[in-house]
Image (spheres, coloured by chain):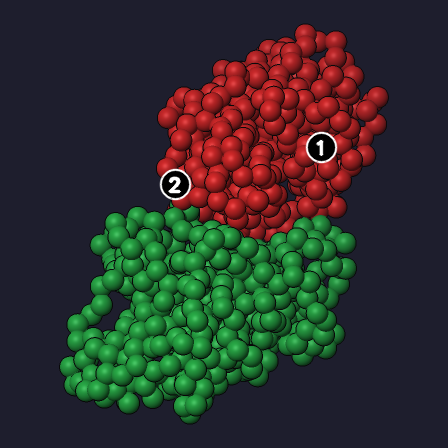
Chain colours: A red, B green
Amino acid sequence: MDDPREPYELTHELHPDDRRLVVKESPLNAEAAHPALAAAITPPGAHYVRSNFDAPAIDAAGHLIAVEGAVAEPFTLAAHDLASLPQRSVTVTLECAGNSRMGMSPLPHGEPWATGAVSTASWSGPSLTTLLDRAGLRDDVVEILVSGADRGTPAGAREATRFARALPLDKARDPDVILAVEMNGSPLPPEHGAPARLIVPGWYGMASVKWVARIAALTTAYEGWFQHERYVYLSGRERRPVDVVRVKSMIVAPEGNTGVARGRVTVWGWAWSGAAPVAAVDVALDGEAWQPAALDPPLAPHAWRRFTASIDVAAAGRHVLRARARDAAGRVQPDVAAWNEHGYGNNAIAPVVFYVY
Amino acid sequence: MDDPREPYELTHELHPDDRRLVVKESPLNAEAAHPALAAAITPPGAHYVRSNFDAPAIDAAGHLIAVEGAVAEPFTLAAHDLASLPQRSVTVTLECAGNSRMGMSPLPHGEPWATGAVSTASWSGPSLTTLLDRAGLRDDVVEILVSGADRGTPAGAREATRFARALPLDKARDPDVILAVEMNGSPLPPEHGAPARLIVPGWYGMASVKWVARIAALTTAYEGWFQHERYVYLSGRERRPVDVVRVKSMIVAPEGNTGVARGRVTVWGWAWSGAAPVAAVDVALDGEAWQPAALDPPLAPHAWRRFTASIDVAAAGRHVLRARARDAAGRVQPDVAAWNEHGYGNNAIAPVVFYVY
């Protein structure tokens, strides 16, 4: 705690129980465990996993990706050839759209995510736009649909479907949107979409399609299950696909429900936003006034940013800390996030309880 | 878990750590710990404690209580003489007005109570109305002010004050409002107000004044600190003294963040309401539909009521349970309770997370 940069990298091997917390065994859904969240780059085996369907059986050596639709020259590419295209690396804080769903009232349907469905990794692979350029997009293309090899019948659906999400053309052409074949310098693990996963920095995780099997240029908006029925903000008359990650922060220390000695307490955590860089974080003890935290230099344009504050806690007993992030676009974490039927985008300030002795 | 009546009484001695959870050491504020909440009558040393000031130094043998104000014959009574008046026993679920404050957003000022500032005990002593009758109330009396021997300067106040609360005359005359000298058949413990504590069934705990030193009949509404500045619902233009306990429920099993085997899971807990008897409790798993729980026979008119439900949980992983109580007056626990500046009366449905393996 004394060295403010120490938590950037863990100096010890994490026990498996300190890596991921399983929310559902099948299909695998797991949060990053608290000890893993102390590292800037989430340690191996700790990055959160969100799966709508079981991981497909893929023969990585022979896996093909079709690039087709409204293009001049559709083609099919072997996944193992992606590594021979120009590579780009992006360090990205990914957050599940349903992260913190359990904090919404009334409790929405969906996986009961607490606050650990957020993690940071470095991903490498060719830019999506490299493949789009090779295919030659027609002038009337509006969206790029990316489909995974995973398939099933979602709860509430009448028929089976693949996991698939569309990106607006502008976003799909962002060179930082890549088809990752490596994660943190190692081959992509199966649960993260091997052999190829789309990585869409700044957007909630549903856009980062795993086990990519097909890339299709569309001339009308896609209205498949995961674009129109799920991963939409649905409330009253509103129905809008989930997209950019909302500004949010997470207190890492003190850890919730642990004890610290009275006196100066170092508070630190991470803050992130999809729309713009994090500009400020404030912290508050108990019901008291907000005070500014210090921000460490940014790690990377699409990664979370570390904040620290030193606060004086004199009274023994239970206390509550809160952190509130603001981004350069002026967005501020709310006390309560707008409720929606599936509980997406909950970026509300999350109080952390700790004890002083 | 198999015998639905077993949790009514604990068959083992509780470790001190399993009795109370200290929220503040001085003045003492402590919640009932989870293991203690499994008993209908909260075990010795486990009943929650709320103190605004440190316990006063009282010589119980010589402690006097003044009964005065707008009465025909003011008098002073030795506390030890209360036991020789006609005794009445009431079994009461007391809840702190600030219980569940930590569930409100934005976080209000005040002690950071989680969900354990609620407990049940049997209290004995003379009815308050016996003393009022002896003094002879004037016709123009509107409130009975009860003051404790505890004194201090509250945070935010300019001057020192005693803890004191007024009851409307009707409520003060309810024979179930007693000056307790015994708790669960033993002499009142110091932290619960020895030698005499007012017990006001159906009202939040602030009305149950500890260390009673003075009972005064008033002809105008009392506007002291704890009636007008604290223990008031304060929000926008609303300013209303906190009074009747709102309908609420608490899931005792499964315990939050514990694991249970997959299959039929017995869910049980307590429900209470100050306004009317509990009429129904519903439970819901994850985001699913509400289903009715069974209610055990009432323990006592002013005590919580036990509910049980058996639900099938097939999938391994994390799950969420909710319980929602309804009382005979038609009041139903809300998803979100109305926010107010000091965070009183939060009776919102409180999801409990558990794991199935």
Residue A290, image x, y percentages: 39, 34
- Residue visible at 52% across and 71% down? B189
Mark 2 Cα-neighbour bin, 10 Å: few <14, some 14–19, many ≥20? some
- Residue visible at 71% across and 20% down? A184
Whether A173 is drawn above or below B179: the answer is: above
Q: CA distance from mark 2 to mark 1?
A: 35 Å
Q: Amino acid at mark 1?
A: Ala
Q: Amino acid at mark 2?
A: Glu
Residue A251, image x, y percentages: 54, 35
Q: Residue furthest bottom?
A: B86
- Say whether residue A98 is visible: no
- Residue visible at 52% across and 19% down? A296
- Residue visible at 32% across and 58% down? B230
Q: Which mark, residue A46? A: 1
Whether A274 is drawn above or below B317: the answer is: above
Callout 1: SS: loop
Whether B197 is drawn above or below B345: the answer is: below
Q: Chain of mark 1?
A: A
The residue tagged 2 is A288
Q: What is the quadrant of the C terminus of chain B in the image?
A: bottom right
Residue A3, image x, y percentages: 61, 21
Residue A61, image x, y percentages: 84, 21
Q: Chain of mark 2?
A: A
Q: Which mark, residue A287? A: none
